[in-house]
Image: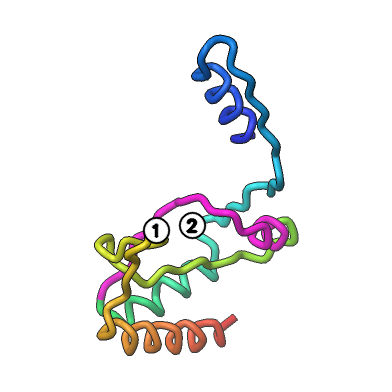
Amino acid sequence: MIADAFQDLIRRGAPAGAELEVELVSAAPPGLVAPDAKAVELGLTAFERATGVRPALIRTGGTLPIVAALAERGIPTIITGFSLPDANIHSPNERLPVDHLPLGIAAQRALFQEFAAL
């Protein structure tokens, strides 16, 4: 678990004689959806149809316990972002250019149309 690795790293980095207390407040199991899942393929197709560019599948981490819960039940989950690297996601100066809004709406519309095929 990453919490154990973090705690070990912090303890090894603490100066000699320092008192350190680490409290785990919450945790969630990892959720992973196969990149070749039908829902993922439909999502890729929908975004490509709306934007003209096939999206890149990027495996990232996050704290969304529902993903693992759904994956355990065989329900693939799509977590989409609609941003570019210069958007500074989750930073104090995060931004989404206003001209991306209609494109995002078109992508979501296409996604729901693709899901109708399920």
Say which quarter of the image contains residue 106.
bottom left
Q: Disc number at residue 91? A: none
**How far from the left and from the top, in percent, is residue 115?**
54, 82
Q: In 3D space, how far apart are the residues under numbered discs 2 and 1 (Cα atoms)?
A: 8 Å
In this picture, is 94 found above or below 109? above
Residue shown at the point (59%, 54%) measured from the top left: 63
Queried whether the magenta region covers residue 64, the answer comes back as: yes
In this picture, is 110 found above or below 64? below
**How far from the left and from the top, in percent, is residue 104?**
37, 82
Count of numbered marks = 2
The answer to whether the residues at label 2 and label 1 have Cβ atoms under 8 Å apart is yes
Going by the image, does 41 lie left or right of 51?
right
Going from N to C along the chain, the mark reached first, 2 or 1, is 2
Q: Give the range drawn in magenta.
A: 53-71
In this picture, is 72 found above or below 103? above
What amino acid is found at the position of numbered circle 2 in the picture? Pro
Badge 2 local density, few (<14 within 10 Å), some, or many (20+)? some
Q: Nearer the viewer, residue 8 or 74?
A: 8
Identify the secondary structure beneath mark 2. loop
Residue shown at the point (37%, 77%) measured from the top left: 47
Q: Name the residue under label 1.
A: 57
Identify the secondary structure beneath mark 1. loop
What amino acid is found at the position of numbered circle 1 in the picture? Leu
Task: Tell me how the rendering is colored.
Answer: rainbow
**How far from the left and from the top, in percent, is residue 37?**
54, 62
Going by the image, does 70 lie left or right of 77?
right
Q: Mark 2 points at which residue?
A: 35
In this picture, is 75 found above or below 26? below
**How far from the left and from the top, in percent, is residue 38?**
54, 68
Quadrant in which the C terminus is drawn: bottom right
Quadrant in which the N terminus is drawn: top right
Residue shown at the point (40%, 71%) measured from the top left: 44
